[in-house]
């Protein structure tokens, strides 16, 4: 089973894993990263680099627990466990493992002498220069990227596999072997899988050992290595070459050692028989400075301290006897050449053109997308391993183009100014709106228009919205929005909406209302005058009528008296 589990739904689309992957074994589709298993060499850089922890290691802890219940189980430890736990914790690791039920806990370094002996036998049969095979990632690199170099690869199993083979020879009954390592590639190595029944990362081992009974651990405190750790230096860059020189297999001039996957790739890509003339042994390790910077180890202490701890542990048990070697344990390699999809030149050119990269002189090659060049990125897009949107420059230009188009085509005037009220940018609508002023970028805003509201925004940092301002000399009415631009300290933006027509209609309506009110008031005043005149006439006639009635009444009374 492929040892990396990819939780692509958590991907944050940062391309950090792709930048860290030296062989570009990661594809992107629908803004999600996916590992191309056939291309991956299992260097584990993508796991270490992912900030969202979208990639995890296949966990065999449950299988190990089942082994402990049903079988005799041996725990083997890569020498790099010291770089994870530290020398002071080694005794606790042994005690906890025995308390959990492991019948043997042993560091793979105890079989180092036998491994060197087998390696020497293999070298003596070779007439051409040799590439070391003790780093399984290097084996993956040659099988998948440089199959033509496989004849130069030393046909010997990794130290962990060799040790597992040695352990099985020492037991008569069937056993299960569990190996703890920081090397993800060991978990997927064809021959390792045959010899080792289960593998755990150091982090997974740490969690498993926490289940050990503390009281039971005390019974195994005295457990320590029973054999010399002669293979400690094999996990350090140059350690293997140094031992071969010490044994007289090669001279110093005949060996070269290097570490780091990028350096190894560059070396393998440029490897030429003419260039390696005189070189007989090429030691390569893909982790920087060797296995001490493997998965979950790179940030644990300094490289110097980790190297010193490895050597300190070797020296501590130098007085112990060496483990007897077994027969040479060979292995075979297979051509696993990864054949990428075709990428027609014309299709690549079309992608480059769409990205705004028209010729080699304009190629930015910023590597922000994770690819080393724009051309390499375009090829990946054609093959379906990448998306155009991964190009930061392309996306920025596209966003700027859209924003620029909107700003230039919007009918409202937009002016960007700084804290000194110097015009930084003005769109065509602004230049047209204030054309009589001759408004120009780079000049002071207060030379043209009233800036009282701009001053308030600059002074307080608080925006002003829907402020109506009249420019009488231009016969211009505007509705203004003035704000500080987001994510800037000294840039401000003023948006002027021309509302002259609305204001003129509003003023015209106001005038009509005023005239109507005045006419209504005049009519009411006239009606009141007429009413008053009518009331006056009615009052006079009423008085005359009353007088006439009074006279009639008097006349009637006189007539009664005469009777």
Image (cartoon, grey):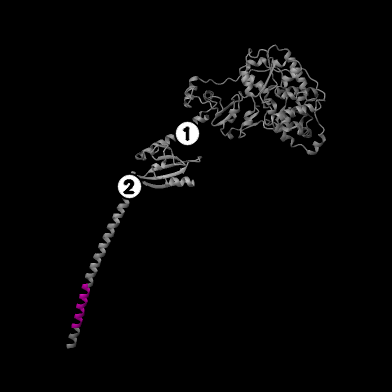
- Judge whether residue 543 is colored magenta: yes
Q: Earlier in the sequence, mark 2 or mark 1?
A: 1
**What residue did someone put label 1 on?**
399
Image check: 325 left or right of 563?
Answer: right
**What residue did someone put label 2 on?**
504
Region in magenta: 540-555
State the residue in front, 289 or 230.
289
Circle 2/circle 1 CB separation < 8 Å = no
Neighbor class of circle 1 (other Cα within 10 Å; few <14, some 14-19, many 20+) is few
- For residue 367, what is the image quadrant? top right
- For residue 240, what is the image quadrant? top right
Picture quarter with the C terminus:
bottom left
Q: Is residue 216 above or below residue 114?
A: below
Image check: 99 left or right of 403?
Answer: right
CA separation in Å, label 2 and label 1: 38 Å
Question: Does dot 2 land on a helix, a strand or a loop?
Answer: helix
Residue plotted at (48% across, 20% down): 346
Neighbor class of circle 2 (other Cα within 10 Å; few <14, some 14-19, many 20+) is some
State the residue in front, 55 or 429.
429
State the residue in front, 198 or 217.
217
Query: Residue 484 appears at what percent x and percent y?
Result: 47, 42
Which residue in the rendered view is the most extreme toward the top? Answer: 127
């Amino acid at each position: 089973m492929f040892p990396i589990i990819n939780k692509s739904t958590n991907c944050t689309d940062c391309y950090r894993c792709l930048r860290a992957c030296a062989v570009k074994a990661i594809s992107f589709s629908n803004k999600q990263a996916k590992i191309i298993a056939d291309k991956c060499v299992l260097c584990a850089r993508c796991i270490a680099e992912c900030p969202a922890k979208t990639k995890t290691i296949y966990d065999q802890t449950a299988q190990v627990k089942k082994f402990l219940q049903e079988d005799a189980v041996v725990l083997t430890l890569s020498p790099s466990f010291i770089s994870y736990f530290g020398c002071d914790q080694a005794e606790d690791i042994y005690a906890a493992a025995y308390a959990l039920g492991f019948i043997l806990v042993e560091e793979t370094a105890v079989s180092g002498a036998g491994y060197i002996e087998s390696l020497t036998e293999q070298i003596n049969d070779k007439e051409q220069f040799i590439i070391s095979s003790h780093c399984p990632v290097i084996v993956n690199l040659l099988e998948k990227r440089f199959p033509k170099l496989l004849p130069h690869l030393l046909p010997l199993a990794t130290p962990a596999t060799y040790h597992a083979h040695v352990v099985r020879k020492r037991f008569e009954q069937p056993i299960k072997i569990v190996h703890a390592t920081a090397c993800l590639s060991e978990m997927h190595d064809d021959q390792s899988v045959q010899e080792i029944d289960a593998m755990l990362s150091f982090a997974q081992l740490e969690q498993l050992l926490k289940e050990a009974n503390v009281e039971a651990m005390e019974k195994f405190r005295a457990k320590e290595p029973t054999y010399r750790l002669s293979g400690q230096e094999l996990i350090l860059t140059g350690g293997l070459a140094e031992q071969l020189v010490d044994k007289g297999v090669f001279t110093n001039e005949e060996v070269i050692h290097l570490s780091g996957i990028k350096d190894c790739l560059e070396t393998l890509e440029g490897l030429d028989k003419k260039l390696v003339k005189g070189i007989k042994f090429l030691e390569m390790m893909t982790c920087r400075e060797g296995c001490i910077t493997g998965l979950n180890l790179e940030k644990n202490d300094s490289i110097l301290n980790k190297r010193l701890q490895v050597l300190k542990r070797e020296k501590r048990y130098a007085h112990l006897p060496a483990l007897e070697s077994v027969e040479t344990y060979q292995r075979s390699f297979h051509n696993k050449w990864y054949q990428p999809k075709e990428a027609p030149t014309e299709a690549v050119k079309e992608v480059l053109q769409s990205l705004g990269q028209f010729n080699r002189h304009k190629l930015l090659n910023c590597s922000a997308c994770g690819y080393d060049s724009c051309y390499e990125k375009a090829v990946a897009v054609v093959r379906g391993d990448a998306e155009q949107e991964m190009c930061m420059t392309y996306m920025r230009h596209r966003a700027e183009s859209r924003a620029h188009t909107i700003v230039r085509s919007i009918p409202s005037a937009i002016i960007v100014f700084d804290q000194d009220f110097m015009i930084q940018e003005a769109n065509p609508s602004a230049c047209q709106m204030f054309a009589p002023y001759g408004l120009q970028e780079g000049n002071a805003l207060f030379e043209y228009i009233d800036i009282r509201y701009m001053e308030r925004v600059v002074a307080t940092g608080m925006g002003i919205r829907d402020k109506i301002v009249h420019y009488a000399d231009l016969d211009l009415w505007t509705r203004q929005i003035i704000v500080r631009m987001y994510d800037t300290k000294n840039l401000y933006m003023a948006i002027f909406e021309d509302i002259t027509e609305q204001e003129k209609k509003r003023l015209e309506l106001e005038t009509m209302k005023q005239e109507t009110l005045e006419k209504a008031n005049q009519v009411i005043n006239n009606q009141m005058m007429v009413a008053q005149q009518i009331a006056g006439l009615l009052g006079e006639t009423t008085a005359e009528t009353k007088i006439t009635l009074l006279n009639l009444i008097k006349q009637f009374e006189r007539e009664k008296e005469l009777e």
